[in-house]
Amino acid sequence: MPPDPDLEAVDAAADYARSIGADGLLSVGGGSVIDTGKGVAVTLKNGGRANDHLNLLTLTAPQTPHVVIPTTAGTGSEVTNIAVLTSHSAGRKLFIADKFITPNAAILDPRFTMSLPKRMTVATAMDAMTHAVEAMTSIMSNRICDAQALQAIRLITDNLPVAVADGKNEKARLNLQIAATLAGWAFTMAQVGLAHAMAHTLGTLFHLPHGEACGIILPKVMRYNVDHATDALIQVAKALNVNTASLSDRDAALAAADAVEALMKKVGHPVQLREVGVKEDVLDMAAFHAICDTAAIFNARPVNDPGEVAALYKQAY
C-alpha cells in the first residue's frame, strides 16, 4: 500500500519543482499522489512550506496548473477540492480545502488501473463506496449529489466483483473509475461523515490503508445513523440491489449496511479491525481523535460523545 501523503512529501516535491522552474504539474497515481500534487500546486504558487497553507477557503486565485491521471478507482481526488495531508508533528490528518485546488483536468483511462492488485482494487472501491454512502447521509446532501452517489453505488456493486475476478476487464475497470469520480463529485458538495472521521484516525494512528479503514467502519456507522438517515439508507439499499418491498422502513435502511458487508465478504475485504492488526486497547484513545475530525460535523446523527464512537470502534473490532 502507498504511504499517506504528508507535508514533508509536499515540501520535497515543491522544492524540486522550484529547482527546475516548473510551471505546471502532472500527477499520475492514486489519491495520495494526487493530494500531494494539490499541496504542491498551492505551495509552488504561494511560497513558503506546505504547513503554511493548511486552511479552508482562503485562496483567491487559480493555483499552479495541475492535470491528473488516477491509477486507482477510489478517492475521487481527481475532481475534489480537498487535499488530505498527514502532519507527523501534530499526529493528525489535516486539510487544504478550497475550490482553487480542484485539478484543471482529469483523464480516466482504465488501462492505468489494470495492474492494480486485488487488495488495492477492493480497498479503493470501498473508499468510493464510503464517499457515496456518506454523501447520501450527510446533513449537507441534496438531490443532485444524491443522484451521483446512487449511481456510484450501483456501479461499484455491479462491477467490483467483476474486476476482482478479472483485473483485465476494461469495462469493469472503467465503470469503477467513473464510480469513484461520481462519488468524488457527490461528497465535494455534501461532505462525508463519521466513517471518514474514524477512518482518518485509523490511518494516522495505525497506518491502516484509508480504503480498508473506510470499508470496515462504514456499515457500523450506517447502523449508528439509521434513525437519522432512514430514507437515504433505503435508497442506498435499493442501489445495492436489496429487495426492500417486504421490509419496514427501518429494516430496509439496516439492510443497506448488511448489503455493504456482504459485498465486502464477496470480494475478500476485511470486515473487522482485528483482521488488519489494530489493537483493541487503543480504541478508546482513537475515539477522542475521531470526534475532533472535521468530517464528523456533517454526520447524519450528531457526534458529541466519544464513548459512542469508542463503542463503534469496538463493534468494528
Image: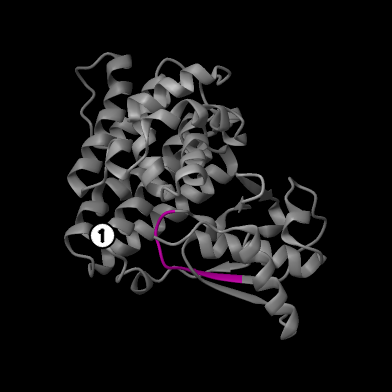
Image point (19%, 17%), residue name: 246
**Could you tell me which quadrant the N terminus lies in?**
bottom left
| Structure colour scheme | one colour
Image point (44%, 48%), residue name: 210
Q: Amino acid at mark 1?
A: Lys
Q: Which percent across, then down, holds residue 148? A: 45, 45
Q: Is residue 151 visible?
A: no
Image point (24%, 60%), residue name: 163
Q: Is residue 244 left or right of residue 313?
A: left
**Could you tell me which quadrant the C terminus lies in?**
top left
Quarter of image, res 103: bottom right
Badge 1 element:
helix
Where is mark 1, residue-wise? 118
Image point (58%, 59%), residue name: 35
Tell me the magenta residue range: 67-74
Q: Which percent across, then down, holds residue 173? A: 31, 63
Q: Which percent across, then down, holds residue 138? A: 52, 30
Q: Is residue 188 visible?
A: yes
Q: Which percent across, then down, holds residue 4? A: 51, 56
Identify whether 27 is placed above or below 22. Answer: above
Does the stretch in magenta take in 108?
no
Which of these two is toward me, 153 or 224?
224
